[in-house]
Image: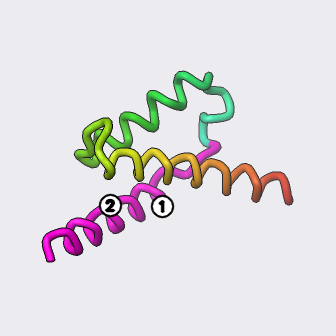
């Protein structure tokens, strides 16, 4: 039961993260290292510690968000 509640909280936090951090606003001008640092800051800001499953999932969501944005821009 605790695991389910934790998963739901993580999903909600990541959903908010996804909505609030639209890529493209400045990321285009950032180096790869700056983007990595920004993603790290976002995930740590949600309380995720590096190396934990929540942190790894958060970082993956950042990559997916960025990829989806790039794909949408490519299509337009």
Name the side, left or right, on which 34 lies relative to 54.
Answer: right
Q: 71 or 5, which is in the foreground?
A: 5
Element marked by disc 2: helix
- From which residue to which does the magenta span run? 1-24
Quadrant in the picture for residue 71: bottom right
- Residue 63: percent from the left, percent from the top? 57, 47
- Residue 58: percent from the left, percent from the top? 41, 50
* Figure disc tally: 2
Is residue 23 shown in magenta? yes
Q: 5 or 68, which is in the foreground?
A: 5
Residue 13 is labelled as 2
Element marked by disc 1: helix
Q: Nearer the viewer, mark 1 or mark 2?
A: 2
- Residue 23 sits above or below residue 75 on the image: above
Q: Earlier in the sequence, mark 1 or mark 2?
A: 2
Residue 19 is labelled as 1
- Identified at 60% across, 41% down, the residue is 25
- Residue 52: percent from the left, percent from the top? 29, 44
**Pointer 1 local density, CA inside 10 Å: few below 14, some 14–19, many at least 20:** few
Quadrant in the picture for residue 33: top right
Quadrant that contains the N terminus: bottom left
Q: CA distance from mark 1 to mark 2?
A: 10 Å
Residue 57 is labelled as none
């Amino acid at each position: 039961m605790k695991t389910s509640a934790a998963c739901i909280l993580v999903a909600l936090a990541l959903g908010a993260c996804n909505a609030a951090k639209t890529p493209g606003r400045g990321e285009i001008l950032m180096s790869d290292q700056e983007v990595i640092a920004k993603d790290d800051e976002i995930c740590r800001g949600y309380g995720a510690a590096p190396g934990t499953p929540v942190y790894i999932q958060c970082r993956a969501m950042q990559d997916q968000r960025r990829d989806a944005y790039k794909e949408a821009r490519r299509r337009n």
